[in-house]
Amino acid sequence: MTRFVPLLPPLSDTERSAYAQAVATAGDLAATAITAALSGDDDEIKSWTDEQRRLAALRIHADTVRAGHPAFGTAGHAVALLDQLGVRWTRTDLVWGLHMLAGRVLPADGSGQRLPAVAAARLDRAWLEGLGPALQEFLHDVGSSRIPEAIRQELVGLVSAAHTRTGAAQIPVHLLHAGEIFGPAATLELAGVLAGPGVAKLLLHCASLRRPVPTTKWRRAAGPLLAAAGDAAHAILTRYTTFDQYVKADTDDLLRGLTCVLDLDPSEPATELIGSIALAAGAADAEFPGFPFAPKTAAAAVEVLARRGGDVPVRVLTRLSLSVKNKALLSRTHAALDRLGSLRGWQPGEVLELAVDDHGLDGDGQRTWEIDGYTAIVEVGEVKARLRFERAGRPLKGVPAAVKESPGLAQARDLVKQVGRTLAAERARVEGLLSEDRVWPAPDWVTRYLDHPVTGLFARRLIWQASADGETWTAALPEQRDRAWTLPGAGSASRIRLWHPALAAAAEVTAWRDHVTASGLRQPFKQAFREVYRLTPAEEQTRTYSNRFAAHILRYRQANALMRARGWHATYLGSWDGGGSSEATKLFGGGAWRASFFHELAGELEAPHYEARFCATDQVRFARRDGALWEVAPLTEVPPRVLSEVMRDIDLFVGVTSIATDATWADRGEDRFHEYWSSASFGDLTASAEVRRDALARILPKLTIGARCELRERYLRVHGTRRTYKIHLGSGNILMEPNDAYLCVVPGRVPAGPVHLPFDDDAILSVILSKAMLLAADEKITDRTILRQLSLT
């Protein structure tokens, strides 16, 4: 808080002495003012003179900045109250108040900055002459502080008004301030643009917007301002699209207004820019996926896109609908997609598949171009996009040195990132179709799925069903004939749907699992080996709720992150009001069904921030959409696809984040939840563990360790040289025969083996195989922690 001090006029010895004496005699006045601020009874200080209120404020300011903490937590409030009742501030008061801040560690509540802010706000232009640079630096310091947002904005507003009266800058500094990285970067890089005529008025108008959809009056006033400011709105927003960090509320307000102003430009480039803004503002840090970088700007961009034509709005909104984890923004995005699809005459669900960007890839999933004599090829592989180079038809191992500084290389790498994002979104969308009863006419399905250069990467490795009459369905994998993809048994008049094992007989499921394993096919997600969850007698008894996955203890932070990754939305557990329980929700069946998964705090909160460490699972409930409302539905009425997909997600949360899967739990000496850990670690198998057992039955005979392994009801039994081991198929935990002694093997220390799996979304299966390979060759183990346990009898 000292950068502005060299820019201030110095205080004379006489002035310093006068303020010291004034402050020394105002102790009683300050104490009375603070008491009034605490009690809310200001009758006594209303009777004071302006000079008495001024002296009390000066003393409170001096005491606050010297102590480094607010007096009774009300110092800032007391100064504000005195100012409101009437204080005749002088220029010297402001200068003295700022000098007092030099070298001080100030309170985190902004009370140390209150007196300079209110004094500056009261002074007219003549009294502020020459203080513009100091006020600007003071503003930057306040903007970059950790003061609570509402107080910070109030202080910035007070000083900004004063700074504007100094005439030191054309752009009010509270609009692009130093409270974050974006403000100074934009100010520095766009100095010429920001100095242009009309820019300040445009920015002030944009910052005044208080809602995602502006009024007609606001838009009408914005038109002339946009024209007068030239390309300023385009320039600022273009710079923002490369900024992948959080912005504060006032910058978010400004960007929201600029986005709505840009809507006045009907051009295609403007639509492209608004789409980029929506994606940049709606993105979030991986650690906080539920908090967009600029939520107000993202909401405004979504509303603007829903009104514009072309392919960009559909493509961007689709991508947001599959990537955003913030419930409010996601709901707004879905509503915008519904409106957009209705305007274009699309059926529900069609808008998502019609908007998939092909990124200029050809039918083989490639895009090529020449860069400085080399051929750059961006192509989609089995899992992700990649960039490779050729010269004269000969593949090269890496990036040629001659193109490392070429702009074309940066463009190619950017395309790889774009394709990668589309692949991730499409994988999630196509997997979500498993809960829907979607049916496509064969020609539409071929165009949107088999022949699409991105979506086809997944569609060609999935099992589909064809029917000529809508009654009899035949399942098949797509085949390529004469470079054209088809589905055997499907004609041009056929209807196509995605195969789900919940709707198939057991023999058919077994046959498909055998085929997928024998052919070496790796499906993009579990389909042939997908877990199936059917209604149980207990659930028929409870009617409207399921306790199938109740009473499990989960590691809360991992569980919450996994829920959000799978598209579930839930309030956080914690010490605040209502933080003792939570309801995670997600839409299934194309939005026709809503599932609720209840969970609550378990155990004590974790110091020092008192965060939830564990949660206990509870009921799962279902509701059916009834217009704009939701109606609780009996479990017997939930479609089999929806029921199975919901239960699969809950099983995933339990199977991955339960403390039963923590190999080190038994070694912590903790008694909490030990009974649960013991029973869940080696208990009956869930549906996901049963599928894991089925997969192992097909994989093990092909492995070199196969002869040393045998599958039991709940375990994979591994015969080592030193001991015989039992790996639980649910938790991956290990017991040693003959006395079932527990063996702690941390997965991170287990070497992975080159094993082909028919799917890649079961981490515990990979852990079990890795542990089996380690234990089958236990004579080669060198880890001292494991060897000490093996020596125990």
Image (cartoon, rainbow, N blue to C red):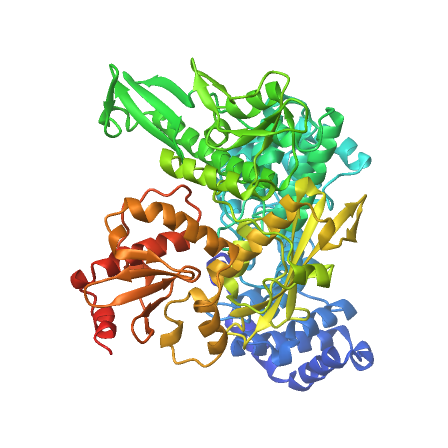
Place of residue 124 in the rendered image (x, y in percent of width and height, measured from the top left): 70, 55
Q: How many marks?
A: 0
Residue 432 showing in the rendered view: yes
Query: Which residue lies at the image location 55% right of the left edge and 65% below the top edge?
Result: 98
565 up-or-down from 786: above or below: above
668 up-or-down from 433: above or below: below
Quadrant of residue 52 within the rendered picture = bottom right
Which residue is at the front of the view, 310 or 742? 742
Place of residue 531 in the rendered image (x, y in percent of width and height, measured from the top left): 52, 49
Which residue is at the front of the view, 527 or 694? 694
**Does 137 sit left or right of 253 as displayed?**
left
Place of residue 697 in the rendered image (x, y in percent of width and height, measured from the top left): 37, 49
Query: Which residue lies at the image location 23% right of the left edge and 27% below the top edge?
Result: 401
- Most distant residue in the front direction: 507
Query: Which residue lies at the image location 50% right of the left edge and 50% below the top edge?
Result: 285
Quadrant of residue 352 within the rendered picture = top right
Residue 100 showing in the rendered view: no
Place of residue 762 in the rendered image (x, y in percent of width and height, measured from the top left): 43, 50
Which quadrant: the C terminus?
Answer: bottom left
- Most distant residue in the bottom direction: 28
Query: Which residue lies at the image location 58% right of the left edge and 64% below the top edge?
Result: 147
**Does 235 sit left or right of 541 as displayed?**
left
**Does 136 sit left or right of 119 as displayed?**
left
Which residue is at the front of the view, 184 or 393? 393
